[in-house]
Image: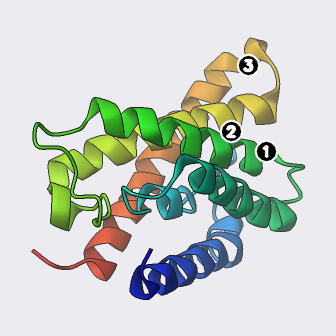
Amino acid sequence: MNSNVFITSILRFIGLVFFQVLILKNVQIYPPYVHLYIYPLFLLLLPFRTPVWATLLLGFLVGISVDVFYDSLGLNAAAGVLVAYSRKFVLQAMEPRGGYEMNQSPNKHHMGINWFLQYASILMVGHLLFLFLLEEFSYLKIGMVLIKTVIGFLLSMLIIILHHFIFNPKD
């Protein structure tokens, strides 16, 4: 990883965690008490060449950083590791014929907006569904989990799209 990508990743980590815990933590959709989540975007935008072990470690670190402020006992860390683990399989399933340019990041500028929205949507739905299932810890409340997942997904993706157009305006 060259120094520019490394510095960008560190700044993205810090910025997204701070935005998550200072702004989005205080935004609750009532009912059903849905929180918005943008911190998985850090994992989604890691370069293609990032090793799986590093992605898993970063997934844990970003999740546990959010857990410290949310008092959620590792729920976000578990969901972050799930996204980090799933990322490899989603990227393999969505790989174009020529493969990926390993020095790039999966964003709208390099892969196109449709590709990025599909990629981000798959991982965000998985993240939110897993997080809300862990939070409720009951399959009896599956209806509430699904409602929270749909509302959280729509609003979180709106914020991710806005973030992507503001901080990656190349198009």
Quadrant in the rendering for residue 130: top right
Residue nearest the observer in this picture, 84 or 116: 84
Q: Quadrant of the C terminus?
A: bottom left
Q: Earlier in the sequence, mark 1 or mark 2?
A: 1
Instruction: Please state which of the two labelled residues, at mark 3 or mark 2, is closer to the viewer.
Output: 2
Which secondary structure lies at badge 2? helix
Q: Which residue is mark 3?
A: 141
- Position of residue 84 relative to residue 39, above or below, is above
Q: Earlier in the sequence, mark 3 or mark 2?
A: 2
- Position of residue 13 relative to residue 36, above or below, is below
Estimate how packed mark 1 is, as few (under 14), some (14 to 19) or many (20 or more) residues with alpha carbons within 10 Å.
many
Horizontal and vertical percent position of residue 57: 68, 55
Residue drawn 81% across and 59% down? 67
Residue drawn 56% across and 31% down? 147
158 relative to 77 in the view: left or right: left
Q: Which residue is mark 1?
A: 75
Residue drawn 14% across and 56% down? 112
Horizontal and vertical percent position of residue 86: 51, 36
Residue drawn 74% across and 63% down? 66
CA gap between label 3 and label 2 equals: 14 Å
